[in-house]
Each structure stands twice: as structure tokens, then as C-alpha cells.
Image: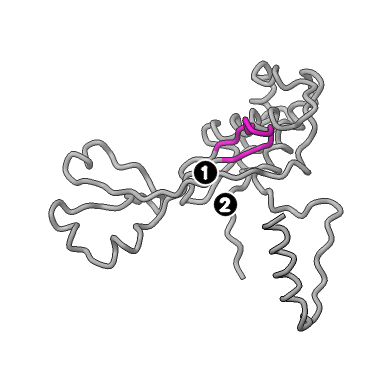
């Protein structure tokens, strides 16, 4: 089965455009240490990871690359419990209710997302004046595990340029197996297993 990656790091370009043995992203982090100032010595690694992600995605070209259906991806500290959350906007096909009949399109010739060399792009202002566009998107927001995030450095220094790429790598691939996690071992289902699960679920819902 082919695995589709949503995010990955452009390590090759980072090395090619780096200088003095340092990657381009690490150099950018060192140049903008003041943007991490509020995170020094933080007991939680979230604030540091949020800033590291923002710098990595706003570089031109970005250090973090993503699937062509990803329009934007931001990280933030949850105002509820301080956890690391990510909000992603994805290009979506039209819902089935709009595709089962094309009659509604005939009045003005509605168009979907434009594509240029396989990439979804925002329609140009000139194109919108001639043809209306209906672009479907999905909004995803979820918390990310903190297990593999590096601790926030205590102060500005060389450690920051090393910790920032690790934070970005962890946020890019939260599906990495956690340290110490053991795979579940399979066994044949027993006749009473399903009923027991139902009784347990009922107790959890009513408790």
C-alpha cells in the first residue's frame, strides 16, 4: 500500500542553499533568535515548536513542503489546555450534491480550483471577472503529540538552531511511533468479547 505524505522537510534544498556547514533553515533561525525570546526555558515545548514551524513554513521556498491539496498549515498553542494544535486547509472536490447534476453550472459556467502544472492555485483576478469559481475546502484542526518535541532551550545560543529543525520534523510527522510504544498483538476473537466491549462502553457512557 502506498503511503501519501502530507508534510515533509526539503532537506536537500536546505543543504544546497546553506553556508559554512549550516543549513538554510538553521541559519534563518540563528538570524531571528529574538522571535523565540518568549519561549526560553518554557516548561512546555509548545511555544518553541509553534515559532519553529512558522519560520519553516514562511521561508521562500519553504523548509516544510506539503501535499498539493494542502493550502495552508499553521501550528498554535491551544488556549484551552496549552497543547500543540495544527489547523490545515485542504482542497476538496465538490460535494456529491453538486456533482450528480451539472444543470446548475450552465447559467454562468462555474469553475473548480484552477491547476497549474498539477498544483492547485488561487484564480487570478482577471479570471474571476470572466468566470465565477466555486472552490471546495476542508478545515482540519487537531492536537499533535508532544512526545518527540525537543525541550525549549534555556537561552539564545547554538542549541536553538539544532532544536528548531527537530521540532519541525516532529510536527511534520506526528504519526512516528512513540518511544516505548508496543504494537498490539492479535488473537482470535472470542464469542464473549464483543458483548463485553458493549457492556463496558455502556458503563463508560453512563458513568
Of 63 and 73, nearer the camera is 73
Q: What residue is shown with label 1? A: 88
Is the residue 194 above or below the residue 111 in the image? below
Does 128 sit above or below residue 157? below
Residue in the picture at 34% in, 42% down: 122
Residue wearing tag 2: 6
Residue 176 lies in the magenta-colored region: no
Q: Is residue 92 left or right of residue 101?
A: right
Q: How many marks?
A: 2
Q: Write the residue at 29% across / 64% down.
A: 99
Whether tag 1 and tag 2 are in contact, CB under 8 A, the answer is yes
Dot 1 lies on which element? strand
Q: Nearer the viewer, residue 92 or 207?
A: 207
Left of 134 or right of it: where is 16?
right
In this view, the residue in front, 40 or 85, is 85
On the image, the x and y values in percent for residue 16 come to: 63, 38
Task: Answer left or right for 183 relative to 103.
Answer: right
Which residue is farthest left?
107
> Is residue 152 at least partly visible in the picture?
yes
Q: Is residue 206 above or below residue 38?
A: below
| Local crowd size for mark 1, using a 10 Å CA cut-off: few (<14), some (14–19), many (≥20) | some
Magenta stretch: give its range.
74-86
Confirm whether residue 24 shows in the render.
no
Residue 36 in percent (x, y) is at 68, 21
Say which residue appears at 67% left-offset and 25% top-offset. 29
Amino acid at each position: 500500500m502506498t503511503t501519501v505524505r502530507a508534510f515533509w522537510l526539503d532537506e536537500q534544498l536546505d543543504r544546497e542553499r546553506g553556508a559554512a556547514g549550516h543549513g538554510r533553515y538553521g541559519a534563518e533561525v540563528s538570524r531571528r533568535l529574538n522571535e523565540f525570546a518568549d519561549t526560553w526555558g518554557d516548561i512546555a515545548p509548545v511555544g518553541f515548536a509553534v515559532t519553529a514551524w512558522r519560520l519553516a513554513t514562511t521561508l521562500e521556498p519553504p523548509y516544510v513542503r506539503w501535499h498539493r491539496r494542502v493550502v495552508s498549515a499553521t501550528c498554535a498553542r491551544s488556549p484551552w489546555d496549552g497543547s500543540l494544535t495544527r489547523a490545515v486547509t485542504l482542497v476538496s472536490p465538490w460535494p456529491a450534491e453538486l456533482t450528480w447534476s451539472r444543470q446548475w453550472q450552465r447559467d454562468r459556467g462555474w469553475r473548480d480550483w484552477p491547476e497549474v502544472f498539477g498544483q492547485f492555485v488561487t484564480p487570478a483576478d482577471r479570471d474571476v471577472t470572466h468566470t465565477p469559481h466555486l472552490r471546495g475546502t476542508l478545515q482540519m484542526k487537531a492536537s499533535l503529540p508532544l512526545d518527540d518535541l525537543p525541550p525549549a532551550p534555556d537561552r539564545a545560543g547554538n542549541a536553538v538552531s539544532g532544536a528548531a529543525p527537530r521540532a519541525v520534523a516532529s510536527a511534520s510527522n506526528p504519526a512516528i511511533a512513540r518511544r516505548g510504544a508496543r504494537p498490539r498483538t492479535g488473537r482470535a476473537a472470542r464469542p464473549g468479547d464483543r458483548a463485553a466491549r458493549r457492556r463496558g462502553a455502556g458503563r463508560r457512557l453512563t458513568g
